[in-house]
Amino acid sequence: MKTFTNTNAQTLDQAVALVQQARTDGQTASLVGGGSDLLALVKDFIVKPDVLVNLKTIKGLDQVVPGAGGVDIGGLITLDALGSHPMIRSQYTVLAEAAETVATPQIRNVGTLAGNVCQRPWCWYFRNGFPCLKNGGSTCFSVGGENQFHAIFGGGPSYIVHPSDTATALVALDAKFRVVGPSGERMVPATDFFVLPRQDAARENILAPGEVLSGVQLAPTPPVRRSTYNKVLDREAWTHAVVSAAVVLDMDKEICRRASVVLGGVAPIPWRVPNVERLLAGQRITPDLAAKAGEAAVAGAQPLAKNAYKVPMTKALVRRTVLALATRA
């Protein structure tokens, strides 16, 4: 492992300045919160920082702050704290359920919301040093290789899947992301934060060098809202979703007035399915309609040689998640 220098930032502006200074000095700097993904990237020689800028020393970035405009969630809140927070559990259930499914209890105790959203892909070619598109090469080895867990939507030229559970939930909640960088602060809709490989195969989000995801803003929750997160795994722990579904329904008694359905584990970004949302809106959700929603969710899927099983799995997950949520007492 390469030797590096650790610096403790006291404010976000100082953190940004430290990154800028390192770049001016010809050094590579990495921002670190919980550090679970960064440590793996450093150990695998994917990231080789000269300077680590520690964000944990910045006060107040791990809080849930309610207000008239909804709630602000600091990017450094741990996944364990997020999943167990009473307000998040009661009003933004899909996010709490997503947070509590991540990895293991040990990782959830240190891993942060911002880190989970911004983590790099776990494709075995990328993580094992192959000269793939994500590592500066010109080939996605998964196309003709081991692609069991790769994308069935939105792939090309890279077929990675976005690994974040919380990102899927945040897109379903129409969250806004607070981004801080050298040019100041900006708010970015969650749907605009993530980048498809066809836009830029080397990146997964819109963060520019020196920018940091400092927090998340969620709108107030209508009293009629129900939400949930379901996830299919190939084993019980220390893994990512093979397929997941974040579903938000605004119900008027038995009628769904508005739906938000976002899939995880199937695309390089959290994959929203607006055709399913339109199908559900204004309808009473019956077993038949839920089955049609499952069918609609996989419209346009383009599986690779070894991941076609994700199509029926996605269909079934959407069907049962939508029906269970709509009929929940």
Image (tube, rainbow, N blue to C red):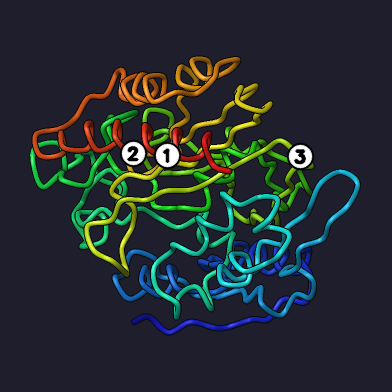
Give percent across and percent down for residue 164: 45, 53
Which one is in front in this view, the residue at disc 3 or the one at disc 2? 3
Specify the quadrant of the image occupied by residue 304.
Answer: top left
Dot 3: what SS? loop
Q: Quadrant of residue 187?
A: top right
Q: Residue at x 64, y 81 (%)?
A: 7
In terms of sequence position, does the residue under pointer 1 or pointer 3 come before the other? 3
Specify the quadrant of the image occupied by residue 302: top left
Secondary structure under tag 2 reads helix
Against 43, is 328 above or below?
Answer: above
Label 2: how many Cα within 10 Å (few below 14, some 14–19, many 20+) = some
Mark 3: few, some, or many residues within 10 Å (few <14, many ≥20)?
Answer: few
Q: Residues within 10 Å of mark 1 (few under 14, many from 20)?
A: many
**Residue 161 location (% of width, % of height):** 33, 44
Q: Which residue is mark 2?
A: 317
Quick check: marks 1 and 2 in contact, CB under 8 Å?
yes
**Distance (Cα) linking label 1 and label 3:** 20 Å
Q: Are marks 3 and 2 in contact (CB under 8 Å)?
A: no
Circle 1 is placed at which residue position? 321
Q: Inspect the image, locate mark 2, and give the three-letter code of the amino acid beneath it.
A: Leu
Q: Is residue 113 left or right of residue 311?
A: right
Image point 42% across, 33% down: which residue?
Answer: 196
Left or right of residue 285: residue 307: left
Q: Position of residue 266 (x, y in %)?
A: 32, 38
Q: Amino acid at mark 3?
A: Pro
Rendering coords of residue 74 (x, y %): 72, 62
Q: CA distance from mark 3 to mark 2?
A: 26 Å
Using the image as rendered, state which of residue 217 and residue 25 is in the foreground.
Answer: 217
User: Where does label 3 land, which residue?
Assistant: 223
Name the residue located 41 percent from the left edge and 37 percent from the top edge.
Answer: 263
Query: Callout 1: helix, strand or loop?
Result: helix
